[in-house]
Image (spheres, grey):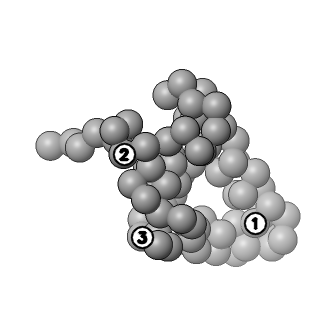
Amino acid sequence: MLFDSGVRTGADVLKALSLGARAVLVGRPYAYGLSLDGEAGVRAVLENLLAEMDLTLDLIGCRSVAELGAEGVRREG
């Protein structure tokens, strides 16, 4: 399953993967980076997204994406 809806942060990517997505599409952040600084902007967006994912994995006590599961996702509201 591909996930492509509302992905803005590394935490969003990890939530989607935790809930069963096999891949996450990041079109809007990619487009923002492209419009701001071309290829360098896209590179910066992707580097920041990966850094956010690494930080979030550390904060939730996982060493890799393979350790994620739906039990780690909490519903708000």
Dot 2 amino acid type: Ala
The residue that disc 1 covers is 42
Mark 3 or 1, closer to the camera: 3
Q: Is residue 39 left or right of residue 77?
A: right
Mark 2 or 1, closer to the camera: 2
Mark before the other along the chain sequence, 3 or 1? 3
Report how far apart the C-alphas of labels 3 and 2 lie in the structure. 18 Å
Identified at 43% across, 43% down, the residue is: 69
Which image quadrant for residue 20?
bottom left
Query: Residue 70, labelled with which disc?
Result: 2
Dot 3 amino acid type: Ser
Which image quadrant for residue 55?
top right
Q: Residues within 10 Å of mark 3 (few under 14, many from 20)?
A: few
The residue that disc 3 covers is 5
Report how far apart the C-alphas of labels 3 and 1 lie in the structure. 19 Å
Q: In this view, does 64 lie to the left or right of 28?
A: right
Instruction: Using the rendered image of the protein, determine whether residue 40 is visible from the camera's viewpoint.
Output: yes
Instruction: Using the rendered image of the protein, determine whether residue 59 is visible from the camera's viewpoint.
Output: no
Dot 1 amino acid type: Val
Question: Can you say whether 49 is above or below 3 in the image?
Answer: above
Residues at badges 3 and 2 in contact (C-beta under 8 Å)?
no
Identified at 47% across, 72% down, the residue is: 1
Report how far apart the C-alphas of labels 2 and 1 lie in the structure. 30 Å
Q: Which residue is more in the foreground, 47 or 18? A: 18
Q: Where is residue 56 in the image (x, y as percent from the top left)?
A: 55, 35
Q: In this view, does 10 lie to the left or right of 34?
A: left
Mark before the other along the chain sequence, 3 or 2? 3
Q: Where is residue 75 in the image (x, y as percent from the top left)?
A: 23, 43
Q: Does dot 1 land on a helix, a strand or a loop?
A: helix
Give the quadrant of the C terminus: top left
